[in-house]
Amino acid sequence: MNTHKMIKPLYRVAALYDAVLGLAFLFAGNFVFEKFMPEIAKPNHDGYIQFPAALLLIFALMYAAIARDPVRNRNLIPYGILLKVSYCSVILWHWTTGNLEAWIWKPFCILDIVFLVLFVWAWRATGKAAGGQN
């Protein structure tokens, strides 16, 4: 299987992953907090959950665009990389300093580290396919 054929499914999975998380927190944020994070206080306003959820949906759309044509939409890949760096650095900081109250953020962090590594690989691979632009 060539690199281009591996990148498309990667970004389809990333789009689905962020879409499912975004929809879950957008429409069932209270349930998610009650079911998976009972040890921490829910934010005092639903908007604090819904806005990041909406951002995940926007990133899901971006990942879907990348999946359609990874080389042509290569310019979008660094934004996905930055999203993963942002999330992972915040979670890893709180996790390693003992300030992460809810376990639920840890599996997402580990998955996002995997996505981060694969996104960097995809960015480099699409650069080679686009004529060496890295």
Image: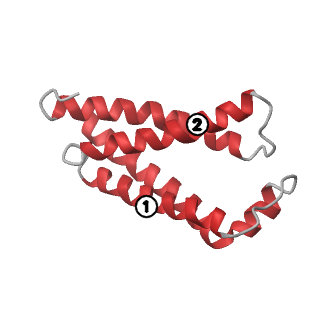
* Residue shown at the point (47%, 44%) measured from the top left: 83
Residue 30's spot in the image, x, y percent?
75, 68
Q: Residue furthest right?
A: 39
Which image quarter is the N terminus in? top left
For the residue pair 56 and 8, the one nearer the viewer reads as: 56
Precedes in sequence: disc 2 or disc 1: 1
Q: Which quarter of the picture shows residue 43?
A: bottom right
Question: Dot 2 corresponds to which residue?
Answer: 88
Give the left or right position of residue 5, taking residue 94 as reference: left
Give the left or right position of residue 99, taking residue 126 as reference: right
Q: Residue furthest bottom?
A: 27
Question: Dot 1 corresponds to which residue?
Answer: 58
Q: Are the residues flagged by discs 2 and 1 in contact, CB closer than 8 Å?
A: no
Residue 82's spot in the image, x, y percent?
44, 39
Residue 46 appears in the figure: yes
Amino acid on which disc 2 is placed: Cys
Q: Which quarter of the picture shows residue 94?
A: top right
Q: How many marks?
A: 2
Q: CA distance from mark 2 to mark 1?
A: 19 Å
Give the left or right position of residue 91, taking residue 10 as reference: right
Q: Residue furthest left?
A: 131
Which image quarter is the C terminus in? top left
As drawn, 42 above or below 117: below
What secondary structure is found at the residue carrying circle 1?
helix
As drawn, 75 above or below 35: above
* Residue shown at the point (24%, 48%) measured from the top left: 73
Crowding near the residue tagged with mark 1, few <14, some 14–19, many ≥20 C-alpha atoms within 10 Å: some
What secondary structure is found at the residue carrying circle 2?
helix
As drawn, 51 above or below 13: below
